[in-house]
Amino acid sequence: MLLYILDLAGVAVFAASGVLASRDRDLDLLGVIVVAAITAIGGGTLRDLLLDRHPMFWITDVWYLVVIIAAAMLTVAYVRVWPPPKVTLLVADALGLALFALAGAQLAEAANCPPLIVVLMGTMTGVTGGVLRDVITAQVPLILRREIYATAAIVGIAAYLALTALGLPRDAAFWVGMIVVATMRLIAIRRDLHLPVFRKS
């Protein structure tokens, strides 16, 4: 039940980030909701396709779409009254990344995937929605901007797997992993940290 609630929370946060990314893109309300939906469920949809989980989670449970639409509408209303600073998108994205990466990792783990695939599936769940959002809104995806983004997801999931292997209860390891992802991402935003760039000498 806790994982389900966190999944819905992640959907809401990513939907809000989709709305924030749609600002100044001349989209109508339907377009904004579409971007919010793609951001919120894009990663989970790709994960389910690769893990052969049918039907898709948002088809069997209408609450995902309800939460997306509600979060999008509330964010639109909020932004009209109190325009948030630009960093709000990055913070919302960091929280969504943390929630989705660990939730995706647990689902891959439940499907008996080996640890490397668990890390890959969790990372993919966390970053794909944001990549689709940025592409649709004509922005360079965060994952391609030297950002500590997918790296944060990888480290957080690896920490989760290591802690469970050491005997820590899965719920506790989940929270630690999520905190690692969000903290790494937020510190990178705050201190403007980037991965080194590969260049020919």
Image: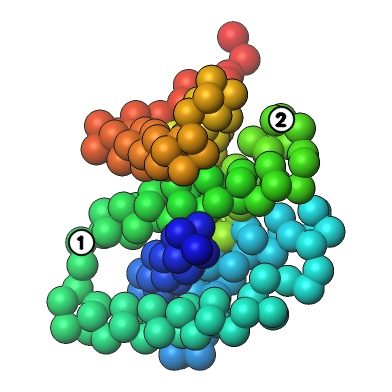
Q: Can you say whether 172 is above or below 81 in the image?
A: above
Q: Nearer the viewer, residue 155 or 161?
A: 161
Q: How is the image coloured?
A: rainbow
User: Which residue is identified by label 1?
Assistant: 85
Q: Can you say whether 83 is above or below 134 in the image?
A: below
Cα–Cα span, label 2 and label 1: 37 Å
Q: Residue 21's spot in the image, x, y percent?
A: 41, 67
Quarter of the picture containing the C terminus is top right
Residue in view at x 59 percent, y 84 percent: 62
Chain-order first, disc 2 or disc 1: 1
Q: Amino acid at mark 2?
A: Leu
Q: Residue 13's spot in the image, x, y percent?
A: 39, 65
Q: Can you say whether 46 is above or below 54 in the image?
A: above
Could you tell me which secondary element the residue under label 1 belongs to? loop
Q: Visible in this render: residue 162?
A: no
Q: Residue 22's spot in the image, x, y percent?
A: 42, 73
**Farthest residue, direction bottom:** 29
The answer to whether 128 appears left or right of 71 in the picture is: right
The crowding category of the residue bearing disc 2, from other C-alpha atoms within 10 Å (few below 14, some 14 to 19, many at least 20), is: few
Callout 2 touching callout 1 (CB < 8 Å): no
Tell us which disc is closer to us: 2 or 1: 2
Could you tell me which secondary element the residue under label 2 belongs to? helix
Q: Which mark is residue 116?
A: 2
Q: Visible in this render: residue 101?
A: yes
Q: Residue 54's spot in the image, x, y percent?
A: 81, 69
Q: Amino acid at mark 1?
A: Pro
Q: Nearer the viewer, residue 137 or 84?
A: 84
Residue in view at x 36 percent, y 39 percent: 179
Q: Nearer the viewer, residue 199 or 72?
A: 72
Q: Can you say whether 92 is above or below 54 in the image?
A: above
Residue in view at x 36 percent, y 74 percent: 23
